[in-house]
Image (cartoon, rainbow, N blue to C red):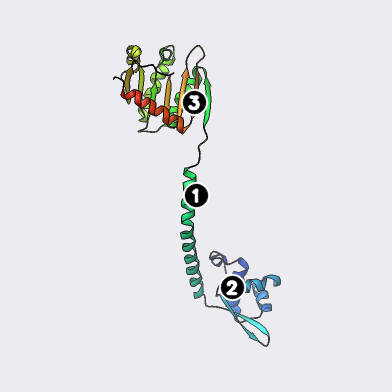
């Protein structure tokens, strides 16, 4: 008979073989048990003691010899109930520990990183990073559109990028200088999911704030983009942007 069902309730393979052997042969001394169950003589007493402690085997002493006998298989159900009760108690005891561990996990410090991207292809990679990290319904902030964005093939890339952004359902708030209103409005007009405002206040370098990241661009013949991954820095930039946004004009 397959011993696996008994192993699944906590018995070892040897213990299961000893118990089933006793069911077949009845009250027996260790010699007959070893022969029938095919277990090691050195281990049989340990197995029997374990079965006795679980209530699956009992014994009597006759003429100074121990005779072992299997208990009713119905006892197995009692054993399952005891294991279920023990697991329930273990689960209850672990609930507080799990809650504390979950709290520690949520407080885990996220490493702060910074990456530099060079050239137009590097800048394009940053914009692709924005789309990869944003999902439908998300919104990010863009500050200060540099004239270089509208030169060469990059203007076409920006238009295509914003079409992909809109298709994905990502929204953007774009803040630029009042003096650039004409060109920014011309290039960016008609793009879905974009809200634009303009300000006469000095603005920092071109900046994107998306999720827990801040991207800053330094334009020129060989543009550079720096992406900082920091929840703290992103939150501060977002707060600064919101203040400027609220004091700017559509």
Q: Residues within 10 Å of mark 3 (few under 14, many from 20)?
A: many
Instruction: Identify whether 145 is placed above or below 43.
Output: above
Label pair 2/1, CB-CB below 8 angstroms: no
Q: Which mark is residue 227?
A: 3
The residue nearer to you, when weighing 15 against 202, is 202
Who's the residue at 50% across and 66% down the image?
83
Residue 191 spot, x, y in % from top left: 33, 21
Q: Circle 3 — which element?
A: strand
Q: Quadrant of residue 149?
A: top left
In the image: residue 26, left or right of residue 179: right
Who's the residue at 38% across and 23% down the image?
162
Q: CA distance from mark 2 to mark 1?
A: 37 Å
Label pair 2/3, CB-CB below 8 angstroms: no
Of the numbered discs 2 and 1, the one sitting upstream in the chain is 2
Give the residue pinned by disc 1. Answer: 101
Q: Circle 2 — which element?
A: helix
Who's the residue at 32% across and 12% down the image?
182
Mark 2 or 1, closer to the camera: 1
Q: Which mark is residue 50?
A: none
Q: CA distance from mark 3 to mark 1?
A: 32 Å
Label pair 3/1, CB-CB below 8 angstroms: no
Q: CA distance from mark 2 to mark 3?
A: 65 Å
Give the residue pinned by disc 2. Answer: 51
Instruction: Identify whether 101 is placed above or below 113.
Output: below
């Amino acid at each position: 008979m397959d011993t696996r069902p008994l192993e699944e309730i906590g018995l070892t393979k040897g213990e299961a073989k000893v118990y089933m052997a006793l069911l077949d042969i009845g009250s027996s001394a260790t010699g007959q048990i070893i022969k029938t169950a095919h277990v090691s003589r050195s281990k049989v007493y340990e197995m029997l003691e374990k079965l006795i402690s679980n209530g699956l085997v009992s014994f009597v002493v006759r003429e100074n010899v121990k005779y072992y006998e299997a208990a009713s298989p119905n006892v197995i159900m009692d054993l399952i109930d005891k294991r279920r009760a023990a697991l329930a108690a273990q689960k209850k005891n672990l609930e507080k520990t799990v809650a504390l561990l979950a709290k520690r996990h949520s407080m885990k410090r996220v490493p702060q990183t910074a990456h530099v991207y060079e050239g137009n292809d590097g800048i394009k990679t940053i914009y692709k990073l924005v789309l990869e990290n944003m999902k439908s319904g998300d919104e990010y902030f863009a500050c200060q559109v540099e004239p270089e964005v509208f030169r060469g093939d990059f203007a076409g890339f920006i238009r295509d990028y914003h079409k992909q952004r809109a298709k994905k359902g990502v929204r953007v708030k774009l803040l630029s200088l009042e003096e650039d209103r004409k060109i920014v409005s011309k290039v960016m007009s008609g793009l879905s999911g974009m809200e634009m405002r303009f300000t006469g206040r000095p603005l920092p370098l071109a900046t994107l704030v998306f999720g827990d990241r801040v991207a800053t661009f330094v334009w020129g013949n060989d543009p550079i983009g720096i992406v900082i991954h920091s929840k703290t820095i992103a939150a501060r930039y977002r707060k600064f942007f919101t203040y400027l946004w609220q004091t700017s004009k559509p």
